[in-house]
């Protein structure tokens, strides 16, 4: 058996504790830096996708989907009761006290009256969008 001996002209690399700490710090900094760049690019991509969806009318699909989910009598419109039952009735009552349910119902009835433009007691897609915008304004004011 023959042993192969490889000689190198470069001196062996020996790091002092200070150099090793500096090297480790730089490596950690670079990892954090690349993660930050990745997250920034991901955020920009997500914001661009939202803008594209809004430009394509992606927001218009939301009221249509909500009507499909909540419309119990399949008339293509939602009443106050259908909305209230879907939002508050299907959830566990745990943590939802009577006062928060009544507060939601009062807001719903208030916004429903202003959103129901034809006064038929039910909201269609366009009226539901108005209702959702009214609730969003309430959230922004808080």
Image (cartoon, rainbow, N blue to C red):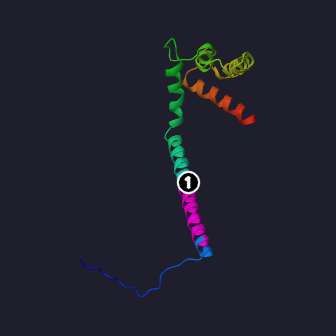
Q: Quadrant of the C terminus?
A: top right
Find out whether residue 28 is within the magenta segment.
Answer: yes
The answer to whether residue 56 is left or right of residue 131 is left
The answer to whether residue 65 is left or right of residue 81 is left
Total numbered circles = 1
- What secondary structure is marked by label 1? helix
Q: Could you classify mark 1 by the number of other residues whose Cα lies within 10 Å: few (under 14), some (14-19), or many (20 or more)?
A: few
Residue furthest out toward the bottom: 9
Q: Give the magenta range.
A: 21-40
Name the image quarter holding residue 86: top right
- Residue 56 vs 91, above or below: the answer is below
The location of residue 70, given as percent across then percent down, is: 54, 19
Residue furthest out toward the top: 73
Residue 120 in view, yes or no: no
Our reading of the magenta stretch's main secondary structure is: helix
Residue 50 in view, yes or no: yes
The location of residue 103, given as percent across then percent down, is: 74, 20
- Residue 29 vs 68, above or below: the answer is below
Residue furthest out toward the left: 1
The location of residue 21, given as percent across then percent down, is: 61, 70
Find out whether residue 37 is within the magenta segment.
Answer: yes
User: Who's the residue at 42% across and 88% down the image?
Assistant: 9
User: Considering depth in this image, is 93 or 133 the residue closer to the camera?
Assistant: 93
Name the image quarter holding residue 92: top right
User: Considering depth in this image, is 70 or 120 the residue closer to the camera?
Assistant: 70
User: Who's the residue at 52% across and 13% down the image?
Assistant: 72
User: Who's the residue at 50% across and 37% down the image?
Assistant: 58
User: Considering depth in this image, is 36 or 104 the residue closer to the camera?
Assistant: 36
Q: Quadrant of the N terminus?
A: bottom left
- Residue highlighted by disc 1: 39
The location of residue 38, given as percent across then percent down, is: 53, 56
């Amino acid at each position: 058996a023959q042993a192969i001996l490889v000689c190198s002209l470069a001196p062996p690399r020996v790091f002092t504790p200070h150099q090793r700490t500096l090297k480790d710090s730089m490596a950690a900094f670079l990892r954090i830096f690349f993660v930050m760049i990745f997250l920034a690019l991901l955020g920009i991509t997500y914001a661009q996708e939202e803008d594209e969806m809004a430009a394509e009318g992606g927001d218009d699909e939301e009221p249509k989907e909500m009507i499909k989910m909540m419309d119990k009598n399949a008339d293509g419109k939602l009443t106050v009761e259908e909305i209230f039952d879907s939002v508050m009735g299907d959830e566990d009552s745990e943590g939802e006290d009577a006062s928060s349910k009544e507060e939601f119902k009062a807001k719903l009835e208030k916004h429903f009256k202003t959103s129901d433009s034809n006064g038929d007691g039910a909201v269609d897609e366009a009226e539901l969008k108005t209702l959702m915008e009214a609730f969003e304004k309430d959230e922004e004011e808080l």
